[in-house]
Amino acid sequence: MSIKKIVDPRKRRHRSIRKRISGTAERPRLVVFRSAKHIYCQVVDDLSNQVLASASDLVGKKTPTSLEGDKSNRAKEVGKLVATRCLEKGIKQVVFDRAGYLYHGRVSKVAEGAREGGLDF
């Protein structure tokens, strides 16, 4: 009798998405992580395994001012923040990685904010 390993459906979808997309130095991958309270973004170059830029709605050294409003508004501001950090480093185009989450709600707000901030994807 074999024991079947149960895999989280989101992680299974993320693996499926990652088979098709990858970040390069010219066009890095913008990946979104969504927890119950917060949202995090990273811009990753998969060829060199480096994080080029990151942002979150947490208050700390990376975000000196607290983001106000509900979670959707904070997600949009995080998208704008990661876009400004990318533009400072000369990154204009990214590949959007929704990390297995459905493209609605906070995930779509991050994408909307990043587009408003000047990123192309």
Image (tube, helix red, strand yellow):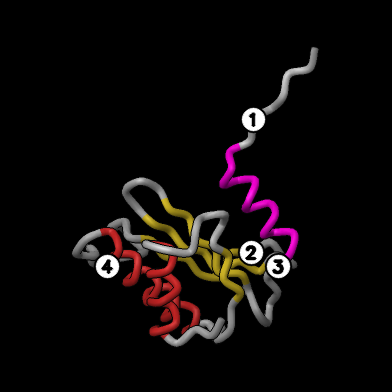
Q: Position of residue 21 (x, y in %)?
A: 70, 67
Q: Is residue 47 magenta?
A: no
**4 vs 1, front mark:** 1
Q: Secondary structure at mark 4?
A: helix
Secondary structure found at label 3: loop
* Location of residue 2 (image quadrant): top right
Q: Amino acid at mark 2?
A: Gln
**Residue at mark 3:** 22
Mark 1 — residue?
6
Residue sitting nearer the eye, 57 or 108: 108
Majority secondary structure of the magenta segment?
A: helix
Indicate the amino acid at tag 1. Ile
Asked whether, in this view, residue 111 is left or right of residue 20, the answer is left
Identity of the amino acid at label 4? Answer: Asn
Residue 94 occupies quadrant: bottom right
Distance between the alpha carbons at the discs numbered 3 and 4 = 28 Å
x, y percent for residue 31:
54, 63
